[in-house]
Image: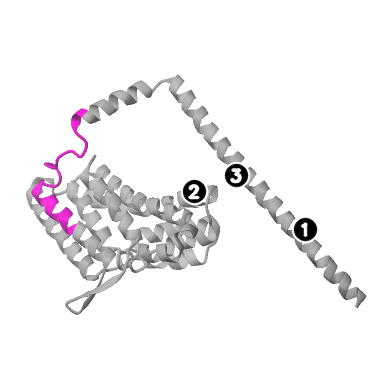
Amino acid sequence: MDIGLISAFFGGVLALLSPCAALLMPAFFASTVGSGPRLLLHGGVFTGGLLLVLVPIGVGAGAIGSLFTTHRQLIVLIAALILIVFGALQVLGLGFDPSKMLPDGADLHARAASKTGLAKTLLLGAASGIAGFCAGPILGAVLTVAAAQGDVLKAGLLLAVYGIGMVVPLLLIAALWRRFGARGRKALRGRTFTVLGRELHTTSVITGLLIMAVGVLFWTTNGFVGAPELVPAEAQAWLQQQAWLLANPVVDAVGVLVVAGLVLLWWFRRERRRDREHESAVEASADGSERSAPAERAGEGA
């Protein structure tokens, strides 16, 4: 598994949790969309909006980087220094909003506010991919790595993974929003602390240190080329062999039946829970009526 892809994914996760707008998007989804299939539908549309903006930007960065492949050592050095600078900016909370650098980028949130339903979700996804003062250095770092790859497809993939890194925690937090409670939401937002008279934020510090570490690793591994495989080659070969064994119609049919069974079980349990809740509500209403009847008769007698 590529270290660059892992870095891009966690960059998306930390961009969603950045202190400027921490949990605003999950809160919006939890309050307006809820959970279940509707959340998944809006999550898919939100992802589409993200990728619609991020992937072309990544492809453009990769195309620019491919023009300088003959100077790879210099590109790797410059990219590593840029990553370290972006990391330092993130630690100090000195961000920037990338949407102001793109045509009409700053107007996406305004357009989203005027829409409703899936159109609003799509525009929110497009805006969230590039907007955000705190997330600016994170996106800049991912774009730097994408440009240094010198590969258009790999650069587009990096930005797609960055977007997916934003979506996964978004859907998880929105689905579990009520269970978190006030204490859990406060913990997810992080906290501020003061160092040498400057107020810092835990999420920004963690993100910045990770970006700086990626910058150092980028330089020492010649742009991740010399980075060790996170999954050994023997393990990859074994996984590929097992995948071939599973690629047959019988296994596919069994898999479909298992998934269908799980869906039916979930639906059955959900219906039973609804029936119990309905019966409880009817019983509570009946009890309330029985209690109020003597009081009404007493009032009539008086």
**Which-is-in-front pick, marks 3 and 2?**
3
Q: Does 281 sit left or right of 73 as displayed?
A: right
Mark 2 neighbour density, 10 Å: few (under 14) some (14–19) many (20 or more): some
Residue for badge 2: 40
Above/below status of 225 relative to 106: above
Reading the image, the residue beneath label 1 is 286
Q: Residues within 10 Å of mark 1 (few under 14, many from 20)?
A: few
Q: Please state the extent of the stretch shown in magenta in the rendering.
A: 211-234
Q: Quadrant of residue 235?
A: top left
Q: Amino acid at mark 1?
A: Ala
SS label for mark 2: helix
Q: Amino acid at mark 3?
A: Arg
Residue 270 is labelled as: 3
CB under 8 Å between discs 1 and 3: no
Q: Nearer the viewer, mark 1 or mark 3?
A: 1
Question: Is 71 one of the magenta-colored residues?
Answer: no
Mark 3 Cα-neighbour bin, 10 Å: few <14, some 14–19, many ≥20: few
What residue type is disc 2 on?
Leu
